[in-house]
Image: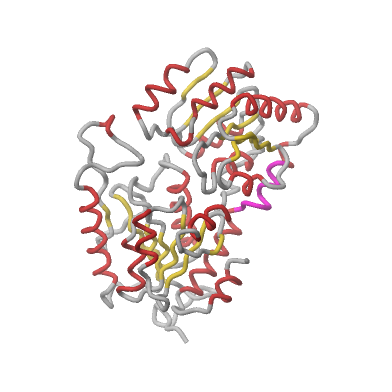
Amino acid sequence: MRRDLDGGQRVIGRERLRVLVVAPERHALRQPHAGGLEAVVWNRVRWLRSRGHDVQLCAAEGSDFLGDDIDLHLPSPRWHQSRDASDTDFPEGHRRLMTDAFARVRDQLDSPATRVDVIDNHSLHGDPILWSRDIGVPVVTTLHTPPLADMVIASNALAGSSPHRFLAVSQYTARAWSAEGVEAFVFTNGVDTAQWSLGPGGGDWVWFGRIVPEKAPHLAIIAARRAGARLKLAGRVGDSAYFDREVRPLLGGGIDYVGALRQPELSALVGAASVALVTPVWSEPFGLVMAEALMTGTPVAAFDSGGTSEVLAGIPGTAIVPAADTDALAHAAAALVGQSRLGLRRQDVREAASARHSLDHRHREIERVLSVAAQSAVPAHELVEAVGA
C-alpha cells in the first residue's frame, strides 16, 4: 500500500499525488500560448492543482505556476537578434545549458525532501526520460511530436524494469514512434469546453496557430483568395524569415494578420468565423487547432496530414483534402460555408466535438494514469484500463 503524502490526509475519493510536470522547454508556459503543446501542458497543471494534487512545474523561465521552493526553472533560449529566433533550432551553447539544468532538477528529485510520486513529462529533450532509470521515479512521457532522435535514444536506453510509460497523442504518432522501437498507448489531447465556447459564426474565414513553414498559413491565404473569401490569421510568428518571405507579401485586400492573441480573444475570433482552414504540410501529430475550432461550432477544412483524420473523424462540418492542394481546400471550405447556410447547425458541430475532445474527460483519464503509474511497476493491462483503451 502506498504511503499518504500529507500525514494521512487524502483528497476526497482519491489519493493526493505529488506530481512534477515537465513542460516543453523552448517557450514559457503562459498566455498567449506559444503553441498547442504549451496550451495542453498549461491546462494540465491548472487542472491537477484544482483537483488538490501537489503539482510542481519544471519549465522555462517566465512560466506561470513556477514556485520558489525548488529551483525547477529551465533556461530560455537567448538569441543575438530577435529575427534569429526559431522554433526548430537553438542558439549556440543552449543544449549544454539544458543538459546542466536537467541534471540539477534530477539531483533535486533524488533527494527524499523533494522526491515526487510521478513525473508527467512533456519535454522534447531526452534527459527527463532517463530519470525513471537513473533515480527510479515513475515517469509518464507524452509523445507530442514525430520521433526526435534525442528522445528515441533515451527511450531505447531504458531497462525493461524501468518505471516508465509512454503515451502518444494519436494513432499516427504512436505508429511513427513504434517504428523507432518506442511503444506507446494512445492518449489524445482535449479542449476546455468552458474556454472555447460556442460562437455566432460570421462572414470571414480564419486560420490560427504557429506561423512556421510546416503549418503553411500562406497556403490558407492562397485558398481564401481563390474562393474570394476574407481571411483572418492569428498566431505567434515562429519563423520571422518565413513570415517575411511567404506570408507578409500576401496580406491586404481582405487578408489580415491580427497577431498572437490570448485565449479569450482567440476563441472569440475563431467563433466569429464561417470556416477554419488548417494547412499542415508536415506529419501533424494531432492538430489541436482543429478541435478548438470545432468546439466553437466553426466548421473545419483541413489538409490530410498525420493525425488529421483521427481528430475530425465522425464530426459534422468537417472536410479533409490532399495536403498542399489549395484548390481542393478552397472548394471544400466554400462547401462547408454553404452547408452552414443550408442548415448545418453550429451547436451540432460543437456537441460532436465535445463528445470526442472534451478536456474534462481527458484530464480525469490522466489523473487515473498518473495514479496507476505512481505505483511504479504496474502491469501493462492496468495502464490500458486507465487510459480507456
Counting from the top left corner in percent of width and height, residue 141 is at 43, 62
Q: Is residue 88 left or right of residue 387?
A: left
The extreme bottom residue here reads 1
For the C terminus, which image quadrant? bottom right
Q: In the picture provided, is 345 more to the left or to the right than 210?
A: right
Asked whether, in this view, residue 285 is left or right of residue 342, the answer is: left
Quarter assignment of residue 127 = bottom left
Q: Name above or below for residue 219 compared with residue 71.
A: above
Q: Is residue 354 magenta?
A: yes
Nearest to the observer: residue 8 or residue 205: 205
Q: Nearer the viewer, residue 104 or 11?
A: 104
- Above or below residue 230? Residue 268 is below
Instruction: State left or right for residue 367 relative to residue 20.
Output: right
Image height check: is 257 above or below 165? above
The colouring scheme, among rainbow, by chain, secondary structure or one colour, is secondary structure
Which residue appears at 34% of the width and 28% of the height? Answer: 240
Q: Residue at x 46, y 79 (%)?
A: 375
Type of secondary structure dominating the magenta stretch: helix
Identify the residue at the far right of this view: 342
Q: Is residue 352 magenta?
A: yes
From the top left corner, tell me how far across and down residue 235 is, in percent: 45, 33
Question: Residue at horizontal 52%, vertical 12%?
Answer: 253
Q: Which percent across, then down, holds residue 214?
A: 46, 36
Q: How many marks?
A: 0
Residue 159 against residue 201 in the figure, above or below:
below
- Write down the region rendered in magenta: 349-358
Residue 195 picture location, percent across and down: 55, 45
Q: Nearer the viewer, residue 201 or 10?
A: 201
Say which residue appears at 58% left-offset and 70% top-offset: 384
